[in-house]
Image: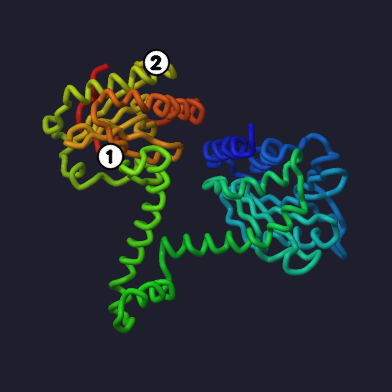
């Protein structure tokens, strides 16, 4: 597996197991050792490569231990300090890393709780660990742009000079991205003022601020969605595709039309022959991956959903056929839906590979059964197989 596959596999393990981890030692065994061995490629059972409870006397501090030291070509290259998963990482947690950084030849120190990894070096002063990390890797929300830099710390591709030379840029880009993310989520007054004064000619009063805060939030979210839409259109549907963006489409709020359907109003939902035919086409396509009994359709007022295992967390496709312009809704690895225009239900066969890959992803990522939730937008009958 490449670095992306290895990190994704560990991210899945963390998501499944972190709620059952209660101690720092369990965090080391469950998450940190697999990170060192599986992701970075070092032999955790070889003391020439990975040294647990690494000790180096520091001035009057005697017998202090760092959780792990990782060696490459006989030299200590990485120092790793571990805290319990779910515990927030604070600078005071890194006191031993600060001391050890100064008395060893290492240039990279890592503070982690098993899910978030903060990487430090000595950009500000030689042989003195910086107060801010140059790279933050969060397995709950992996940033794939960071993986090439992480690969430079693996046993097979170790390139310390390249990591250090890129650290300055990574440090500030990472900080800028986190600042922007915070502003998009909950904008500060300065950010609101900055944008407002470029579109509003009056004075920036408290009343104007209150008026523009929700507008800034809405505008930034729409801007981000439009950027994602453009990329997905180019990748999947061309310029005519309609893309519905959601972090997890099965957990989004229902549309106004869908929300207006009473829970017991199944007689208002009409399953058309075209929807039945579309469901059968999807089922015929993915039967190469799973038994047809595992492919279930749920009809809603505005679309017909096709699910794996009758589980709304495993959407295979959505059939938007009860309209003049028809769409096939397909899903990517983040469960973001892309609606692709189709002229006829038979056009679904043209996206067979994508549908099969969607099912295959669920089989790899979820080998054990997941709890079945309710489809937010569905209150209609389940189609017969």
On the rendered structure, is 54 left or right of 183? right
- Which residue does the numbered mark 1 point to in the structure image? 376
> Residue sitting at 66 percent across and 59 percent down?
134
| 250 over 292 or under it: above or below | below
Query: Tag on residue 34?
Result: none
**Which residue is the extreme one toward the left?**
267
User: Where residue 341 sits: x, y (%)?
Assistant: 28, 36
- Which residue does the numbered mark 2 point to in the structure image? 291
Sequence-wise, which precedes: disc 1 or disc 2?
2
Disc 2: CA contacts within 10 A as few (<14), some (14-19) or many (>=20): few
User: Where residue 182 sits: x, y (%)?
Assistant: 47, 62
Looking at the rendered image, the quarter that the N terminus falls into is top right
Number of labels in the image equals 2
> Residue sitting at 32 percent across and 82 percent down?
205
Q: Which label lies toward us, 1 or 2?
A: 2
Which quadrant of the view contains residue 312?
Answer: top left
On the rendered structure, is 89 left or right of 268? right
């Amino acid at each position: 597996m490449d670095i992306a596959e290895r990190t994704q596999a560990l991210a899945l393990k963390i998501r499944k197991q972190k709620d059952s981890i209660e101690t720092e030692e369990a965090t080391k065994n469950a998450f940190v050792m697999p990170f060192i061995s599986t992701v970075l490629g070092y032999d955790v059972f070889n003391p020439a490569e990975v040294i647990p409870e690494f000790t180096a006397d520091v001035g009057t501090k005697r017998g202090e231990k760092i959780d792990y030291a990782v060696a490459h070509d006989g030299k200590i290259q990485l120092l790793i300090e571990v805290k319990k998963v779910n515990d927030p990482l604070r600078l005071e947690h890194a006191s031993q890393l600060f001391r050890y950084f100064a008395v060893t030849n290492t240039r990279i120190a890592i503070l982690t709780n098993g899910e978030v990894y903060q990487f430090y070096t000595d950009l500000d002063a030689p042989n003195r660990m910086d107060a801010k990390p140059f790279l933050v890797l969060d397995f709950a929300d992996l940033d794939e742009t960071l993986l090439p830099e992480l690969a430079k710390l693996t046993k097979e591709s170790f390139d310390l000079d390249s990591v250090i030379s890129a650290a300055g840029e990574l440090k500030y880009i990472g900080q800028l991205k986190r600042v922007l993310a915070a502003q998009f989520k909950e904008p500060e007054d300065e950010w609101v003022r900055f944008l407002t004064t470029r579109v509003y000619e009056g004075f920036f009063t408290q009343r104007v601020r209150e008026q523009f805060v929700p507008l800034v939030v809405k505008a930034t979210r729409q801007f981000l969605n439009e950027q994602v839409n453009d990329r997905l259109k180019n990748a999947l549907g061309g310029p005519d595709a309609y893309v519905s963006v959601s972090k997890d489409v099965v957990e989004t709020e229902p549309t106004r039309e869908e929300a207006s359907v009473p829970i017991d109003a199944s007689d208002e939902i009409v399953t058309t022959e075209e929807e039945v035919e579309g469901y059968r086409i999807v089922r015929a396509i993915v039967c190469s991956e799973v038994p047809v009994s595992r492919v279930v359709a749920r009809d809603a007022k505005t679309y017909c959903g096709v699910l794996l295992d009758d589980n709304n967390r495993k959407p295979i496709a959505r059939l938007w056929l009860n309209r003049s312009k028809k769409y096939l809704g397909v899903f990517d690895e983040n469960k973001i839906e892309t609606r692709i225009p189709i002229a006829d239900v038979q056009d679904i066969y043209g996206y067979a590979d994508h549908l099969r890959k969607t099912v295959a992803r669920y089989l790899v990522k979820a080998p054990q059964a997941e709890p079945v939730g309710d489809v937010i937008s569905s209150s209609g009958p389940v189609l017969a197989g």
